[in-house]
Image (cartoon, grey):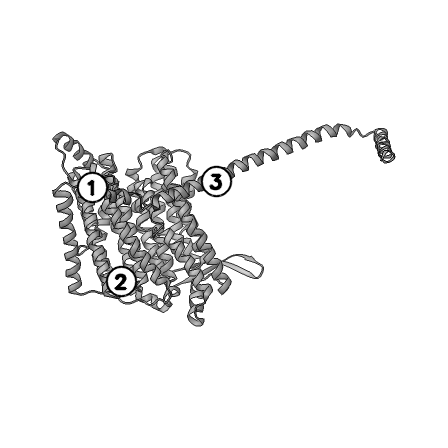
Amino acid sequence: MIILLSLVPLLAFLTAITMMKRESGWIQRLALLGSITPLLFLPILLGQSGTIQNLDWFSVGASHFQIATSLLPINLLLFALVALMGPLVVLYSWGFMNLVTENKRFYLELLSFQAAMLAFALSGNFILLFVAWEFLSVTSYLLIGFWNHKEAANIAAREAITIILIGDIALLAGIAILYSAYSTLQFGMIVSDVAANGAGGALFAALTLLVLAAFTKSAQFPFQEWLSAAMEGPTPVSAFLHSSTMVKAGVFMIMILYPLFVGTRLMEIMVAVGAATALIAIMNALAGSHIKKILAYSTIEELGLMFFALGIGAYSAAIYFFFAQTFYKALLFFYSGNLIRANDTEQIGEMHEAKGNKILLVSAVFGALALAGFVPFNGFVANITLENAAVNTYAYAFLLGIDLLVSIFIMRWLLLPLKKFDSKSRASALSIRYRTLPRSMIIPGAILAALALVTSAMLPYISNLAKGMAKYGYAAAPLGFGYIDIAVETALAAAGIAIAYVLFYKNGNVPSQSNSFWGRVMNNGLAFDGLYHYVANFGYYVAGAFEFFDEELNALFDWVGGAMTALGDTLRYMETGLVNSYVLAMLAGLAIVIIAVIVA
């Protein structure tokens, strides 16, 4: 199968890294080469656009199960995003992961994560989707808890896998219902069946479970807090996780099954949950002091808007938002990693002199302006197309309010590290640290900054991609906007920049999450964070109890086995091979039986 062959070189490099006995720079080079190989296959896959291929896997009675791959335009888009981001994340990791002894494990887990997401992107049925979905869960757990010497990282990994497990169970149950109702796991066949024969109660039950799975995977209310806790992982992992991989998996699953959701009450649920999630995330970002967690909440807000867009029927706008967010979000995470490396802190209020590296700063400005929706960056196009697709005045006003708040918090995030030191010697020392950052940590950000600008011109292509899905049953309105939309969006972005400048840079206002009631409430994720910790720890202790029981049961079996072996060793001495001995033993036994009968 030519589609799955695109993953073979990546898996080959994974094998090569595994076989290397010593840590060396070759591991980094192999990881980069492996991450590039899917990108080389992209032209071949584009030449087969629209292809759906099946590969027989196993049979149970009369039921035959296949792995199906799909090259619909939406599949190719996600494959391209992951294939492009993989090499940039690996290149950035060259400078960031400076512990040679950890390189092998890190790159094995990172490339496995990329392979799982690429397989997910190519999914044409629920079998491949579920397998890739589970591999994403496992690899994200390993990467979030990569710094396993830190208890906070272990807790964050357990919290993430616990919440995601809820969605895994819901997804599996939904798949079982769909197979029972339609006798197939192929996306296209289910969509065609529903289009021809209508929906039933079984379909609605299955879709409800799939939406629940999507909400957990893509960190929607009330499951949003695991994603901010996941910032305990290395920064390259955060960049990959938030830009093009696991957190988008839930949104993508809804996109590829979108015709099944249209017209159901689940659309309204997606609107409500997406809106609530976006508001909660923005409030957390405004109150945040941890540089990566602020970005994590901005991702949660963006995912909420994607669900909101899907819920109001703005399929094309959701796709463009899905596409554009990749570049500026990875860029901002790379920049945060550079700031952390230079300042030796993750608290944004303790960072200074970010002007020390001009290329780094310009790249960050591009990323922040894109996220804020400033013209002419791709975030501006993403925001304006979504607003233009709003179905009523309330939705339009909501999106405008979100845009203003987003502009404020991201400019706060950008401006606070620009503060100067009072001491010239400390400022000079920090400036040197900025200028001596590894080039591998600067180049990926510069590339992404350029992409955040030039990909705004890809609106017609993404619009055509969305319209191209129509022949597969996906109704998508064309993307567009007018001069008034441009003026409104630009004014909101500029207003947000001005407000952030006055409040947080000029006046030096650096709110701490512990200084106010609101800050403390948001820091705890509206109490959901504490609940997640409780659930994760409860599961951890339950697993420990099962482990203890398993150990004791094994010990009991070992003792019984040892006793039986000892008994056998003793009894074998009675096997002499002498007939006379056996006759005497038989007569003795017979005498014992007769005596027992007489006595009874």
Of the numbered discs 3 and 1, the one sitting upstream in the chain is 1
Q: Quadrant of residue 570?
A: top right
Amino acid on which disc 1 is placed: Pro
3D distance between C-alphas at marks 3 and 1: 40 Å
- Binning the other alpha carbons within 10 Å of mark 2 as few (below 14), some (14 to 19) or many (20 upward) gives few
3D distance between C-alphas at marks 3 and 2: 50 Å
> Disc 3 vs disc 2: which is toward the camera?
3
Q: Is residue 450 left or right of residue 202?
A: left
> Disc 2 vs disc 1: which is toward the camera?
1
> Residue 543 bears which disc, if any?
3
Of the numbered discs 2 and 1, the one sitting upstream in the chain is 2
Q: Which residue is mark 2?
A: 461
Q: Which of 75 and 254 lies nearest the eye of the viewer? A: 254
> Residue 511 bears which disc, if any?
1
The mark total stands at 3
> x%, y% of residue 283?
25, 49
Amino acid on which disc 2 is placed: Tyr
3D distance between C-alphas at marks 2 and 1: 42 Å
- Give the residue at x 51% y 39%: 546
Q: Which of 425 and 447 lies nearest the eye of the viewer? A: 425
19 relative to 406, above or below: above
593 relative to 380, above or below: above
Contact check, label 2 and label 1, Cβ < 8 Å = no
